[in-house]
Amino acid sequence: MVRIGVISNAHSKRNKMSMREIHTLLAEHPQILHCSFHHIEELRSCLLQMAAAEVTHLVVSGGDGTVLAVVSALLNNSPFKVQPCLSLLSAGMTNVIAHEVGQPGLPATGLKRLVQRVEAGETGEILERPVLSVDFGDGRVIERGFLIGGIGFYQGTQLVRRDIHTLGAKQTFAAKLGIAWSIVKILAFGPGPRSGFRGENIGLTIDGRGERRDCLMFLGSTLNSVLPGVAPFWGVGPGRLQLTTIDTPPRRFASAAFAVLRGKPKPWMADAGYLSRRMEKLELDIHSPVMIDGEKFDAPANGRIVVTAGPVMQFHKF
């Protein structure tokens, strides 16, 4: 028997905008279990309720941070005897994961379509993506996610939150506007205090092969894209983890920037320090914070972070 359960982040602006429609839909389908949380610490209780009710199809309505928390809980300490089918609604400030493997459109619209099709016996399009396992090596729990970035990626995220979100821009538009604004600042001022982008000398060990780079930014993911139309990976090979790095100071940045974003490199870019590779395991030696699915994590004191392409998660898209 199919049992749908919905977990929603009450602080999500898109959830707030759609809550009337969601409540109307849930009232029409009383068999659906709904649990809304205000603080991430309450997520465990929601999952326990879903497991106790023998939910077979779990719907997560939130942003990347909420998805990260749910995926981590399901992999690290799942309360379910049998893992439920998993679907995502785009309801957060950032929705990188849901853009690729989740429901398009507003949460209420996506949920309505999902309920109709699941209760009709459909499974939807099943998409598989490996989950990143990130080990900080200092006693912290293994973090799970789909995207990790640092240096300029972290600095750009802070720029977006300070300069773009305060203007009222949200979602994909805010992210793309932030990318454009970051490019403009780097072109105008270069790395340094005026642009807000500062490189760092980091160590990279890729499947056992070590190197050091003066790096402006790095971005790693098991996803194929980070936003609609933005797919900054072009490495070849069997590895499930994709990693793109840009050296600092960036050379011929005006010519390279949009080629990087599209994942379509020009012949000269590798020699100029624009690299994209595939691997199974990445060891970082870094001392600035990293971002995992939109959440900030400080580097450990020794700077060593181990990132591996771990277990595969299935997502049902309708």
Image (cartoon, helix red, strand yellow):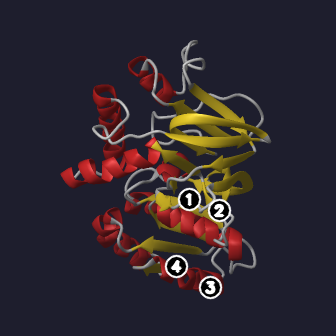
Task: Kindly identify the amino acid type of the residue bearing the numbered disc 3.
Answer: Ala
Badge nearest the viewer, 1 or 3: 1
Q: Provide the secondary structure element on which disc 3 rests.
A: loop
Pointer 4 residue = 43
As measured in the structure, the alpha-carbon distance from the residue carrying label 3 to the one carrying label 4 is 15 Å
Q: What label sits on residue 53 in the rendered view?
A: 3
- Read off the residue under disc 2: 136
Q: Is residue 91 left or right of residue 238?
A: left
N-term-proximal mark, 4 vs 1: 4
Q: Is residue 58 visible?
A: no
Residue 168 horizontal/vertical position (percent): 21, 53
User: Residue 137 or 9: which is nearer the viewer?
Assistant: 137
Q: Which mark is residue 299?
A: 1
Q: How crowded is the residue under tag 1: few (<14 C-alpha within 10 Å), some, or many (20+)?
A: some
Tell me: 259 left or right of 71.
Answer: left
Front in this rendered view, residue 275 or 33: 275
Q: Is tag 4's residue or tag 2's residue first in the polypeptide sequence?
A: 4
